[in-house]
Image: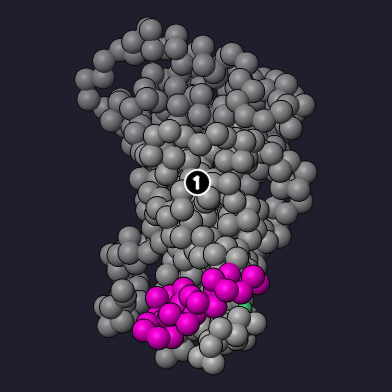
Amino acid sequence: MSGETNKAIECSEFDRLLMEALDGALSGDKLKRFHAHARACSACGPLFAEIDAGRRLLRSLNEVEPPAHLVNNILAATAGLDTARLELPGRTVALQPAWLDRLENWVAPVLAPVFALVRQPRFAMSFGMAFFSLSMALNLAGVRLGDVHHVDLRPSALVRQYHMTAGRVVKYYENIRFVYEIESRVRDLKRATTPAEPAPRPEHQRKDNNTSQHEPKPERNSSWGDNQPMLASGRQDRLVTIACASRRLV
Amino acid sequence: MEDVQVVAALIRRCIAGDAAAWEEIVRRYHRRIYNLCYRFAGSGEDAQDLTQEVFIKMYKTLNTYDDERAAFMTWITSITRNLLVDHFRKTKHDRMTDSLDVPVSEHEDAMPLSHRMEDHSPAPDARLQSRETGESVHHALQKLSPELREAVILRDLQDMDYREIATVLRVPEGTVKSRINRGRAELARLLERTYKQVM
Ligand SMILES: [Zn+2]
């Protein structure tokens, strides 16, 4: 197309050299002729400019930092599994009761009533709901949620996480990583109850209570705004029940 | 990049039930996998879930890895890519119905679609501008078709060679190259105003 000299390359040759040019593998005369064609050809020139610009933009992206707790979550999620086993479709479902059993043993003295409640079929509580209840029970027992650094378990965060679309909630709570978070919480509970534990600060309790009571903020989009009131009222009814039960027996 | 012998030993120890070896594998590769998931899926939250799924899958199928057939990195990238494809299929409908609902991610270069670069005037501060460029490139990436998106991510962000990418995507190398260039050009067109300012 350019036909400047008999040394000039054609569009087909330009295409063939394109990847090498972009990868910096062209040099000398070949590179000169490549660029000469790019300047002269109204089809190849703009195409090369676009591809090159896209490449630079992509390569300008920095690597992002994974969340600090990711490694621990992965290790926790794989801890109960046998390596190289055939994948079972009902994996998470099968794991949950076992984990609940273990958890029950750890926290039995304090939280047995909550588990009894959780396990009653009439409450038909999901694992996620059980976790959420446990969080609230711990909260009422005076465990300071703000002390857990590596996972965001502040009531506001839980409320936020809970208020996703129904499908999202199921997926999230079925996720085994919650088990890890429960473990963390239980460790915190132990730490908080065994040594000379300072009485829960009234202002802190007030803060937590407030956070758990007030209406969730419509933090992000409006597309699931319709679901919010329903989810919120369902959550609070159950929480009140569980909170009362645990308070009576702690 | 990966020491073949060290990785092979780690895998052997892992299959034998050595938890420390597994932890080492997780520490070595989680960052790369997380980044791949984040750039493909768009949100940090999805990237966390997906990265965890990748490692669960890896853990269960470690004994099927054959170092004669592919480098370990290529193998885990294939696992990741397959899970990303599944994820894309599952969430396609959701994303079509609420395309403006890109979750606010914890990463600094993420921003809602409604604040895309196209709607912004150029930032006077050079540092600000480069951050905004990162944000807009990340969001433009989400608008590429999954075929083009995965190709450019593997090449330009993960630095894989064409042969490795061809193995992961199970298409010929020529197809890989064409998708990479189409993806780059498409991205540049989406960000035309931005790149004319920075380049
Ligand atoms: Zn030409």
Give the x, y percent position of residue A180: 43, 45
Q: Disc 1: which chain? A: B
Q: Residue at x 39, y 34 (%)?
A: B125
- Can see residue A37? yes
Give the x, y percent position of residue B68: 42, 91
Q: Looking at the image, which is closer to me, B80 or A130?
A: B80
A45 lies left or right of B65: right
Q: Residue at x 44, y 12 (%)?
A: A207
Residue pointed to by mark 1: B197
- Can see residue B81? no
| Range of magenta residues | A18-45
Q: Quadrant of residue A126?
A: top right
A58 lies left or right of B148: left
B44 lies left or right of A105: right
**Residue type marked 1:** Gln
Q: Quick one: label 1, few (<14), some, or many (20+) residues within 10 Å?
A: few
Give the x, y percent position of residue B27: 33, 60
Q: How many marks?
A: 1
Q: Looking at the image, which is closer to me, A99 or B136?
A: B136
Ligand 1's quadrant is bottom right
Quadrant into which the N terminus of chain A falls = bottom right
Q: Looking at the image, which is closer to me, A134 or B192?
A: B192
Q: Residue at x 48, y 41 (%)?
A: B132
The image shows residue A46, relative to residue B67, as above or below, that is above
Residue A29 highlighted magenta (yes or no): yes
Q: Residue at x 58, y 46 (%)?
A: B193
Residue A31 highlighted magenta (yes or no): yes
Q: Secondary structure at mark 1?
A: helix
A164 lies left or right of A102: right
